[in-house]
Image (spheres, rainbow, N blue to C red):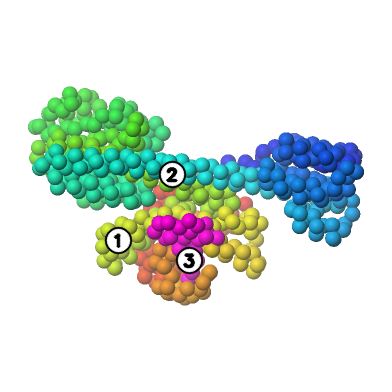
Amino acid sequence: MTPQSTLTNEPFDVLVVDDQPMIIEAVRRLLSDDARVRVHGCQRATEALARATELRPALILQDISMPDGNGLDLVATYRQAPSLAECSVVVLSATEDAAVKAQAFALGANDYIEKLPPKAEFVARVHHHAQASRALLARAVAMRALEEKDRELQIRNAMLDEANDRLKQANQELVTDIGAQRKKVESLASAGTGLAQIQDLDLLLITILEEAVQFAVASAGAVFVRDGTELRATTIYAHGVSTAAGSRFARLPISHATVVGGVAASGHALRIERLDGTTNTHHIRLRSRSVEGVPVAPEGILPSEPTSMLMLPITQGSNILGVLALCDAIDDDGFSLDDERLLRHFSSLAAIAIERAQTARSLLFRLVAMAALRDPTETAGHVQRVAGISAILFDSWATAHALPADERARQLDQLLTAAVLHDVGKVAISDAILKKPAKLDDNERAAMQLHSEKGSRLLSEGLNSDLEQSAAIVAYCHHEKWDGTGYPRQLRGEKIPLAARIVAVADVYDALGSRRAYKEPWPREKIAALFRDEAEKHFDPQLAQMLLDRIDEVERVRDSFPDPVAKCV
């Protein structure tokens, strides 16, 4: 059920403040057909604030002329009460008086009704203002939750920094204790520092696997991440390349039904050395394709007959975050005890980085969820697809421009976060514009275009990192066009920041290929034709061609993050 439909179906309270019982009863009768509406009456102005504070209704219908008080004064009083900040206030008046109406709106009233209008009109207005009130309340709750998560993140970051200090000390001790492994350990310390700098979870998991494969000199491997009571493969290494595992691999239970699941369930590492098809390591024997009768690789992702294995739990305290699985060591003797010790330490560094990235991703998608409350097209699936397509385009651009590996990784990390947040400014655009089923007029279009500026301002407040700066730039500039006809600043050509040009291509491609209430998804050929036509007009011509060159990969990204099935009306 969508947030919008949830709001629509919830019961709500209406408080009628009027000294005439017949008016209260008339309102109750007008709304009696809808069981969701609970009507309450208050006949004394002196009791109205206390009654409203106790009830916290979605809507207050306030009479102007009351024997013991002034209704307009009460409007101002309601607006000063923090507990009624999201409540809609509608003034009821016996007469249509322009001056009084203007005063009511100036004091914070949401509407002015000459009592009482025809039933259909009255019911529609009540539902409109009640729904607006509940949407504001939902947004306030989400904002408070986000602020609380931010405070939790700050505390957790402080704890993680302390853990990092301890791990640095452990690194120093490890370097001292291991002579032959000195070079690997120094690389490990450097890798730990590098992991701490990566914000995007998917990029982090790829980096963790590649570093682990390099340390242990393995031929294949995978990273499994905990998802509730299951493990899911996120990244695989084979044939010298790391890639996303995709959806074709089954989830694994955290149990001893498989070797990987057993490592997660027990929290203990598993190392199997190569000894003529039979080995004895940690009291576990490898016979052909099973370990004590448990299949070694039914996961469909590791080699079906591994000659050696090294699997380590990724843990933070007592919390199992996932499993790092390596297969087929290059060394004829398989994985050594030194490999296991080194990778145990590395998995501790990886756990800290994963937990940090998971927390950061959770906060990012809370922002996306807030945007989705306002704009149904701004879904988690959409932003993940835009991020995935942006990564493909950046890979082509970085290769064409021979970008150094360290700079390539840094820019990709920033780009992925910026792509997720590119339209977050829509939270500041009114529902009347965001959800209008018809074409926007000039004034509405101008208001909608302000989302780029509002998003940039939201992301740049308290600016303290390159990541936030990059996200703010993409939010501000992703609607600029190559020929200078875009907004908000009519930038032209390469004056548009690269990240914004990339996200613009990815955003439009995904929007055209997605179903909307007002259109069916475009076929791939039609979208490709548009990009050929709009190169050097809307889009950077080099990026448009790169999209067309890798369109099969782009479509695979789109298939990996589908939106929930929704009815088009």
Residue 524 visible in the snapshot? no
Distance Cα–Cα, label 1 vs label 2 = 27 Å
Distance Cα–Cα, label 3 vs label 1 = 22 Å
Q: Nearer the viewer, mark 1 or mark 2?
A: 2
Labels 3 & 1 near each other (Cβ < 8 A) = no
Magenta residue check for 466: yes
Q: Quadrant of the N terminus?
A: top right
What amino acid is labelled 1 in the image?
Glu
What amino acid is labelled 2 in the image?
Gln
Q: Nearer the viewer, mark 3 or mark 2?
A: 2
Task: Residue 449: give x, y in percent of width and height.
Answer: 57, 65
Q: Which residues are magenta?
A: 454-481
**In the rendering, which numbered label is found on residue 477?**
3
Labels 1 & 2 near each other (Cβ < 8 A) = no
Query: Which residue does the image show at 22% across and 31% down from the upper left?
Result: 270
What amino acid is labelled 3 in the image?
Cys
**In the rendering, which numbered label is found on residue 241?**
none
Mark 2 is surrounded, within 10 Å at the Cα level, by few (under 14), some (14 to 19) or many (20 or more) other residues, namely few
Main SS category, magenta section: helix
Lower position in the chain sequence, tag 1 or tag 2: 2
Lower position in the chain sequence, tag 3 or tag 2: 2
Q: Closer to the camera, 56 or 547? A: 56
Left-right relation of 335 to 537: left
Task: Residue 528: give x, y in percent of width and height.
Answer: 43, 65
Mark 1 is surrounded, within 10 Å at the Cα level, by few (under 14), some (14 to 19) or many (20 or more) other residues, namely few
Distance Cα–Cα, label 3 vs label 2 = 30 Å
**In the rendering, which numbered label is found on residue 407?**
1
- Disc 2 designates what residue? 154
Task: Residue 46: give x, y in percent of width and height.
Answer: 83, 40
Magenta residue check for 117: no
Query: Which residue does the image show at 32% across and 28% down from the upper left?
Result: 265
